Image (spheres, rainbow, N blue to C red):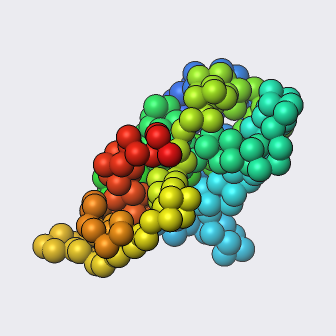
């Protein structure tokens, strides 16, 4: 397929524009553009190769996720010599949280490269983080681990990784509220239900009860997001008590 042919130098106007955009973004010269092109193909295009295998960014996303995790793990191992396994795992999860990866993808404006049959406003928030991971996977296949390592340091570790701030960051408000309730012997309940209303896209609402009293509600396009939203509101409602407990 011409769209994914192996090239060392751009041979069309579109390839040339893509090449120079990537070069500016990555701070090094991409060699095989086919890897990077694949990193921005959404599954909605239903592209396949000559053997009928799907062509999209999902396999690169898997690869990039593993590489990103390994680079962050190595950094934390060196920078937090007193951290035990649990601490290191928790800190890595905070660095590579979906929220952080989505933010990275947005700031790099990676969505401009995506080819899809779905309107950009309808593909979902997580696409930004997904294609960031896919880009890391493409860098690995094109230039190897050292280039990935430098890219992750430049784009993730240097601007975002502050161990002291990360220690105080709550990675899951739901988990935090549950742990706090258990610690203070309070009864809690997360009650969820579909709440689509007149909207075409499915929505969920979650109501949180503490000791039988309704404290907060969250509404989002997934149950998990609605739970986090509601739990975050519970956190702020009880912040003084939480800080003193």
x then y, percent, for residue 193? 30, 78
x then y, percent, for residue 95? 63, 40
**Among the 4 quarters of the image, the one containing residue 119:** bottom left
Residue 5 seen anywhere in this rendered image of the structure: no
Name the residue located 47 percent from the left edge and 57 percent from the top edge: 177
Badge count: 0
**Residue farthest left in this picture:** 198
Name the residue located 50 percent from the left edge and 46 percent from the top edge: 245
Looking at the image, residue 43 lies above or below residue 61 = below
Name the residue located 42 percent from the left edge and 69 percent from the top edge: 188
Q: Quadrant of the N terminus?
A: bottom right
x then y, percent, for residue 111? 44, 43
**Residue farthest bottom in this picture:** 193
Residue 85 seen anywhere in this rendered image of the structure: yes
Depth check: give the residue in front, 219 or 58: 219
x then y, percent, for residue 195? 23, 74
Name the residue located 54 percent from the left edge and 27 percent from the top edge: 21
Depth check: give the residue in front, 161 or 212: 212
Depth check: give the residue in front, 120 or 235: 235
Answer left or right for 139 relative to 167.
right
Answer left or right for 34 relative to 168.
right
Looking at the image, residue 84 lies above or below residue 116 = above
């Amino acid at each position: 397929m011409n769209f994914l042919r192996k090239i060392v130098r751009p041979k069309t106007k579109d390839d040339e524009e893509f090449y120079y955009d990537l070069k500016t973004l990555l701070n090094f010269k991409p060699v095989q553009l086919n890897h990077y092109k694949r990193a921005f193909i959404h599954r909605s295009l239903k592209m396949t190769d000559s053997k009928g295998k799907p062509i999209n960014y999902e396999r690169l996303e898997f690869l990039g996720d593993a590489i990103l995790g390994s680079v962050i793990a190595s950094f934390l191992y060196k920078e937090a010599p007193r951290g035990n396994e649990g601490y290191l795992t928790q800190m890595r999860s905070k660095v590579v949280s979906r929220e952080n990866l989505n933010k990275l993808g947005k700031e790099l404006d990676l969505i401009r490269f995506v080819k899809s049959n779905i309107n950009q406003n309808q593909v979902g928030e997580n696409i930004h983080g997904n294609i960031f991971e896919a880009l890391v996977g493409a860098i690995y296949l094109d230039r190897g681990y050292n280039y990935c390592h430098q890219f992750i340091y430049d784009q993730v570790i240097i601007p975002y990784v502050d161990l002291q701030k990360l220690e105080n960051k709550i990675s899951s408000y739901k988990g935090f509220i549950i742990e706090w309730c258990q610690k203070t012997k309070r009864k809690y309940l997360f009650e969820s239900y579909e709440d689509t209303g007149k909207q075409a896209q499915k929505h969920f609402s979650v109501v949180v009860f503490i000791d039988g009293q309704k404290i907060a509600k969250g509404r989002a396009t997934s149950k998990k997001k609605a739970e986090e939203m509601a739990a975050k509101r519970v956190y702020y409602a009880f912040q003084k008590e939480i800080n003193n407990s």
